[in-house]
Image (cartoon, helix red, strand yellow):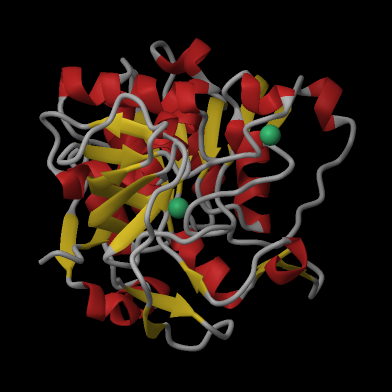
Amino acid sequence: MLSFDVCECGAPLQRMERETPTPKGAEVVLKVIAAGVCHSDLHIWDGYYDIGGGQKLKLLDRGIKLPLTMGHENVGEVIAVGPDAKGVKVGDRRLIHPWMGCGECLVCKRGDENLCVKPCSVGIHRSGGFATHVLVPHPRYLFDITGIAPERAAPLACSGVTAYSALNKVKDTLSQEPVVMIGAGGVGLMALALHRKMGGKSAIVVDIDPAKREAAKAAGASHVIDAAAKDALDQIRALTGGGAWAVIDFVGAGPTVKLGVDATIKGGKVIVVGLFGGDVVVPTPFFPIKALTIQGSYVGSLTEIAELLDLVKRTGAPDVPIATRPLDQVNAALNDLRDGRIIGRVVITPQA
Ligand SMILES: [Zn+2]
Ligand SMILES: [Zn+2]
């Protein structure tokens, strides 16, 4: 099998050749048909998150080992199953839920493997899909995608379930109040598409990039606001009748979280999804006076990915712009993403 691996943080991925794995126990081996390139791949590649004040949260100190095959948004076709792998057979096309935990603890047992303290996620802690083949430890991570094109299904594993889980956290107000979304990158555009399917009233999108605002408008945003405009906050307040009940921050920079907090009405929620980095100061009296909730959201659970696929099968795949590229262009795809040249999602197609 072939893969493109991070061998040194931030250096170009290296082409590697190794033996295709043979599944043991409940393991399943798939050939990769589609592997989405995600913004968080850039952080994994760099090897750190910026946590503000010049400090870095280093991934190599958190159990990530090199060389690493990244790629956590994968659709594959089953080519071999272990003797104990039930419910899948050779030839099945499946979306891989990448957010694996230890599988043993209470958190994992209730399906929230994405919140396990011993994560074992595909493309982060274990080999991912920037490769011709991928090994999955158990069929419970494999989801049927009948009726959904592989390159449209792949991004559901990260950007899809991340957007779905964030929207799920504000579902109480979704059908009655506009939701404010900060950042119209891959996940933001996905959220915009899913928001409609989930019965959302309307979405106001805030972004500094005119091209991304344009894309958001085309994807159904009721209003778009330039985050750099001096009156951005006033515009949000005017469009939400005094303040937003729900702000979802897909950027996660200090100033965007601050904007989110300032833009909420009493009782409002800010859901932080993006990992851009930085920090934010929130006056503590805001919490009681504004009855403020700031909640983080990290990818999604097995239950949420099942719900999301059900929603997509009923209502159609989210209409997010998708461009495909062959496996040997993965470095170029990552660089384009870093330089802000991607609208929507790039999906690597290793069999093409
Ligand atoms: Zn991702
Ligand atoms: Zn666990």
Depth check: give the residue in front, 27 or 246: 27
Measured as percent of width and height from the top left, residue 76 is found at 25, 48
Measured as percent of width and height from the top left, residue 15 is found at 35, 84
Depth check: give the residue in front, 148 or 159: 148
Position of the C terminus, as image quadrant, is bottom left
Q: Quadrant of residue 116?
A: top right
Outermost residue to the right: 284
Measured as percent of width and height from the top left, residue 115 is found at 66, 35
At 58% from the left and 58% from the top, the residue drawn is: 125
**Residue 350 falls left or right of residue 258:** left
Whether residue 222 can be seen here? no
Outermost residue to the front: 83
Q: Quadrant of residue 48?
A: bottom right
Q: Is residue 41 above or below residue 108?
A: below
Depth check: give the residue in front, 39 or 251: 39
**Residue 75 falls left or right of residue 44:** left
At 89% from the left and 30% from the top, the residue drawn is: 285
Whether residue 338 can be seen here? yes
At 89% from the left and 35% from the top, the residue drawn is: 284
Count of numbered labels shown in the rendering: 0
Q: Quadrant of residue 268?
A: top right
Position of the N terminus, as image quadrant, is bottom left
Measured as percent of width and height from the top left, residue 317 is found at 18, 33
Depth check: give the residue in front, 245 or 77: 77
Q: Is residue 308 above or below residue 19?
A: above
